[in-house]
Amino acid sequence: MTVPRKSSPRRTGRAAGGLKRLLHLRRSRCDGIADALWSRILRTSRYAQSLNASDRQRLRELANRLLREKSFSGAAGLVVTNAMRARVALHACLPVLNLGPDYYAGWDSIVIYPGDFRVHDEYTDEHGIVHREIMDLCGQSLSHGPMVLSWEAMRDEDEAPADHDLVIHECAHKLDVLNGDANGFPPLHPDMDVREWSRDFQAAYDWFRAALEAGGDPGVDPYASEDPAEFFAVLSETFFTAPHRVNDTFPAVYKHLQHFYRQDPCRYLPRESS
Ligand SMILES: [Zn+2]
């Protein structure tokens, strides 16, 4: 896939002079996302709105940092606005609010298409047969490559908030590949038990697939049944948008996500009406 790129403007500033000037410099550095725009985009995430003032401030600082460190470019004629950048940055920083920005090291660009985009995929199966596929996607995270997003999909989420969050989904893939393949197994913290994570995620994944095959509605996007990487990504976005649904259906998985992300959205968000 060929996408246009441009380098991100990097802000530099050196404090000099009296207190007034220092204050001014400090303030302008914090003003990556203007107050009015920040208030507006906060409304695109129920979870971000529910955070306390100091967490919201940390989220804003992380978002400003992401805007300085990642380049944004529009594809297929899309002109990327400050509002689009800010909207992506806010959602991207929710998963790393208590992890830190280093979790997004190793890739540097975000590409936004006006709507779904077409990709040509090629893979070799276990028999050595090469398969070529054409897929229309609304999001894609390439290992060590750009994150690619559909603006239409994000706008749809904002107009009718539900349990979807494309940016968080793609960011979960970015976290997943920090220790190798996309397989639903991100690098766990030292106090987390790898075997318990694997056991509980595998049991939840198997149950979820069986429930779908039996015609049930397990309350989570069926796309999670695609493979373990999608299961982790879909459950991560649901964790931040409709956390009670994850906790009710997969309590053990909720606990693992709570430890991994070091956040507990069930404490902040009211139960979703069914
Ligand atoms: Zn995915």
Image (cartoon, rainbow, N blue to C red):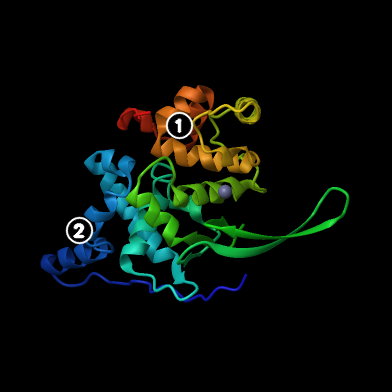
Q: Is residue 125 visible?
A: yes
In the displayed structure, 123 sits above or below 5; it is above
In the displayed structure, 46 sits above or below 171; it is above
In the displayed structure, 86 sits above or below 170; it is below
| Residue found at the far front of this picture | 215
Query: Which residue is at a point 50% across and 24% down the rendered structure image?
Result: 249
Between 190 and 228, the residue placed more toward the observer is: 228
Q: Identify the image quadrant of residue 34.
A: bottom left
Query: Do the residues under discs 2 and 1 have CB atoms within 8 angstroms?
Result: no
Q: Amino acid at mark 2?
A: Asp
Query: Which residue is at a point 31% across and 49% down the rendered structure image?
Result: 44
Q: Position of residue 159 (x, y in %)?
A: 33, 51
Query: Which residue is at a point 42% across and 48% down the rendered structure image?
Result: 100
Between 20 and 176, the residue placed more toward the observer is: 176
Q: Position of residue 226 (x, y in %)?
A: 64, 42
Q: CA distance from mark 2 to mark 1?
A: 30 Å
Q: Amino acid at mark 1?
A: Gln
Q: Mark 1: is the Cβ under 8 angstroms from ligand 1?
A: no
Element class at badge 1 = helix
User: Badge 2 local density, few (<14 within 10 Å), some, or many (20+)?
Assistant: few
Which one is earlier in the sequence, the residue at label 2 or at label 1? 2
